[in-house]
Image (tube, rainbow, N blue to C red):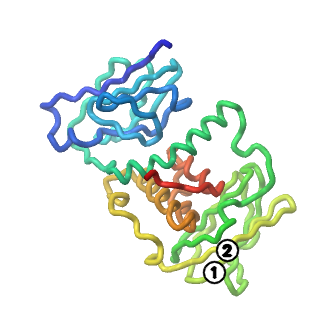
Amino acid sequence: MMRFAILLFWFWAASISPSWSAGEIGYVEDFTGLASRYRVTHDGHEIPMRLCLPLYVGDTIEALDDKARATLRMIDHPEPVAWSRGDRDTKLTTSGAGTSFLSDLMNSTLAALSPFDEQKRDRVLTTIRGDGGGEFGVPLLESRQTISLGQKTIAVGWLPASTLAEISITDNKGKALVSKSKASGGIWLSPSLNLKPGQYRVTLVAGGSKVAGDIDVVDALQIPHLPAELTQENIPQSLRHTAQAVWLAAQSNGQYRLEALQLVANDRSTRSAAVLTEALIAGKTIELPK
């Protein structure tokens, strides 16, 4: 099989500091087609292509498909870098001004997105759409969810995405916070609500079907404390929120998946955030690699 488009990252010793050379130089934000159509080499070993894959000095990306395209994020570069077969001899350099942030925990947390991303790519390639029919359902609310209190919006989602749904939220006294709000597209964000500790009920109605789920609102101290590696301010916000959401969703058998959805629902501009949002709405079990 003919190989196309090898992108080789060149870094001369004089242009980087020792601390920078030990860290990542960027990561894969997105790519077209299946991961199997790429070959990534790191330190002489082939590693699988995936979303948010860290890139290091000397790594190479080789495409086995002439339609391959990728979007890379270089740590010292403010804009995404487009990569394609035409970049065979492109040399990327660094000022060394960036700050490394893809720790082992960050990397393993983001790696949990890969199975959902591959499933989505398979669906697209086989023309099976993500909302292709099926009964109305809200898998995310099939188990009791816990979120933190405060002035905030609540995001909920349903399947299939093409269904027009009617959403209501009541407190444990039956008082309506949201009454029969209608939305389509598979996701809805509430107006800003002042959530106090207690139990709330979210009800969704569509096409004669009714689904309800309970939410426990608790003090933020009762929500699992995020690891410091996932909260660094130098991590791009969308990536930071996605990693935090993956980690939260994996805690306590999925009890915090709704809380995780709140982190990514407002910003689905990157593929990683969009893939995670879809997985959370579908009630997928998120597992961190061991």
In primary-sequence order, the first of circles 1 and 2 is 1
Q: Residue at x 65, y 78 (%)?
A: 200
The extreme top residue here reads 2
Q: Amino acid at mark 1?
A: Gln
Q: Label 1, label 2: how many angstroms apart (C-alpha)? A: 7 Å
The reply, left or right, for residue 221 in relation to residue 212 is left
Say which quarter of the image contains residue 29: top left
Q: Is residue 88 above or below residue 139?
A: above
* Badge 1 element: strand
Say which quarter of the image contains residue 244: bottom left
Q: Is residue 108 above or below residue 66?
A: below
Give residue 228's position: percent from left, percent from top: 33, 62
Dot label at residue 199: 1
Q: Are marks 1 and 2 in contact (CB under 8 Å)?
A: yes
Q: Residue at x 29, y 38 (%)?
A: 25
Give residue 149's position: percent from left, percent from top: 52, 77
Q: Nearer the viewer, residue 119 or 266?
A: 119
Q: Residue at x 46, y 31 (%)?
A: 70
The reply, left or right, for residue 38 in relation to residue 257 is left
Give residue 27's position: percent from left, percent from top: 38, 39
Dot label at residue 31: none
The extreme left residue here reads 14
The extreme bottom residue here reads 173
* Badge 2 element: strand
Pointer 2 residue: 214
Mark count = 2
Give residue 261's position: percent from left, percent from top: 56, 60
Q: Nearer the viewer, residue 183 or 257?
A: 257
Q: Amino acid at mark 2?
A: Asp
Q: Is residue 17 above or below residue 274?
A: above
